[in-house]
């Protein structure tokens, strides 16, 4: 290919936490050096807030901060247009528009921005492979080599997802952070992976819950087929894949009533339209259950304070303990309309 090894940067935000091992392996198999932006910190957030317009959600602003930390250190920025990774569904419009946002805000030349489209909505796996062929052609003309790189990347992705299923969080896998202490009592933590997996954005919520004596389950730890089976209970699922995964996971635990799960926490981004809709639906389903468990919705944005989060978590744990001890619903009556 090329004498000098080219560097390609992957911003640590949004779908990074879902496709980390897939993207990294794919690019490395094509002979590139992968540079990942550092974990989110105060400077990254401040930079993202400076460039992000008011209308975009907090996680997108954080993503922009990661782009800024990379753009002058690499030859290429990897910002694929992930239109759909599940047939018949879409990703959030703001994720679809990321390449345009990055290009226009920072003036990234087209030859440096890797923004090929991956779209499974209409053609399923064919759209997936077509998208990665387009991405790979930036550096490799031989389609067989690109598809071979994709096969290895998909194997790495399956390994990554398998680790998440057994209770490993993305930061444990990516940054070798220590695992949480196993606990018999659990909390179901719902939300987009970029909220539940970025410990700076969520103010170490997983560790805080663990320190209060509870383990954490996320939708990444639930089998996809189970999620999809319970999603069938919804008369009309949403257009957005991750929203559907949150809904299906919530319904699975509501209906199966795992005795180890003592409460539900739903993390949402304040400016996120899909989150506001999904949060309302999940809360209504929980309230309809005759024998339910406590529910807490946490809205996260750039103004969220850690002290307030800790206070709400401690009160929520008190509620779960009270509910468990008395074995009665925290609701006065189930919602009937």
Image: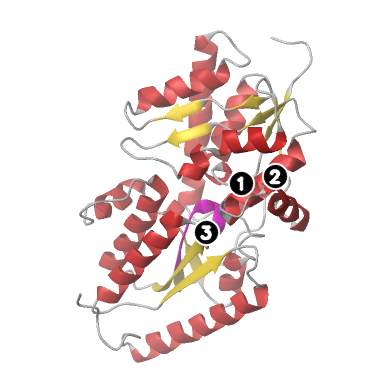
Q: Earlier in the sequence, mark 1 or mark 3?
A: 1
Quarter assignment of residue 89: top left
Answer whether residue 182 is visible to the viewer in this image. Answer: no
Residue hosting label 1? 13
Residue hosting label 3? 271
Q: Going by the image, does 135 lie left or right of 139? A: left
Point out the residue furthest to the bottom here. Answer: 326
Quarter assignment of residue 37: top right
Return the residue nearer the eye: 3 or 101: 101
Q: Is residue 189 magenta?
A: yes
Disc 1 + disc 2, Cβ < 8 Å: yes
Q: Position of residue 95 (x, y in %)?
A: 51, 42
Give the alpha-carbon distance from disc 2 to disc 3, as whole Å: 19 Å
Give the alpha-carbon distance from disc 1 to disc 2, as whole Å: 7 Å
Quarter assignment of residue 72: top right
**In the figure, 194 relative to 276: above or below?**
above
Residue hosting label 2? 66
Q: Position of residue 325 (x, y in %)?
A: 39, 89
Label 3, residues with CA under 10 Å away: few <14, some 14-19, many ≥20: some
Q: Which mark, residue 225? A: none
Return the residue nearer the eye: 188 or 335: 335
**In the figure, 48 relative to 180: above or below?**
above
Disc 2 + disc 3, Cβ < 8 Å: no
The magenta-colored residue range is 188-196
Q: Position of residue 8 (x, y in %)?
A: 69, 28
Local secondary structure at mark 1: loop
């Amino acid at each position: 290919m090329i004498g000098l090894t080219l560097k390609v940067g992957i911003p640590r935000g949004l779908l990074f936490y879902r496709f980390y091992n897939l993207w990294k392996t794919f690019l490395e198999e094509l002979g590139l050096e992968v540079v990942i932006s550092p974990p989110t910190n105060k400077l990254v957030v401040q930079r993202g807030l400076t460039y992000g317009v008011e209308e975009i959600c907090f996680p997108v602003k954080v993503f922009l901060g990661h782009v800024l930390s990379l753009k002058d250190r690499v030859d290429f920025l990897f910002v694929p247009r992930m239109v759909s990774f599940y047939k018949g569904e879409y990703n959030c419009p703001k994720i679809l528009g990321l390449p345009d946002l990055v290009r226009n805000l920072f003036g990234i030349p087209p030859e440096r921005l890797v923004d090929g489209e991956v779209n499974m909505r209409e053609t399923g796996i064919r759209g997936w492979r077509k998208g990665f062929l387009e991405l790979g052609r930036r550096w490799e003309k031989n389609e067989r080599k690109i598809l071979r790189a994709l096969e290895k990347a998909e194997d790495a992705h399956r390994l990554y997802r398998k680790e998440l299923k057994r209770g490993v969080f993305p930061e444990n896998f990516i940054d070798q952070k220590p695992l949480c202490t196993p606990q018999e009592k659990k909390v179901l933590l719902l939300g987009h992976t970029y909220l539940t997996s970025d410990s700076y954005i969520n103010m170490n919520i997983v560790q805080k819950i663990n320190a209060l004596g509870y383990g954490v389950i996320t939708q990444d730890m639930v089998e996809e087929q189970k999620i999809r089976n319970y999603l069938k209970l919804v008369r009309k699922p949403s257009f957005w894949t991750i929203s559907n995964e949150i809904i299906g996971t919530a319904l699975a635990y509501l209906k199966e009533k795992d005795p180890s799960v003592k409460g539900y926490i739903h993390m949402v981004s304040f400016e996120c339209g899909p989150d506001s809709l999904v949060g309302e639906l999940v809360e209504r389903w929980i309230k309809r259950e005759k024998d339910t468990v406590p529910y807490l919705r946490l809205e996260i944005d750039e103004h969220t304070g850690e002290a307030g989060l800790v206070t709400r978590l401690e009160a929520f744990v008190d509620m779960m303990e009270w509910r468990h001890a008395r074995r009665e619903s925290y609701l006065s009556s189930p919602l009937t309309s």
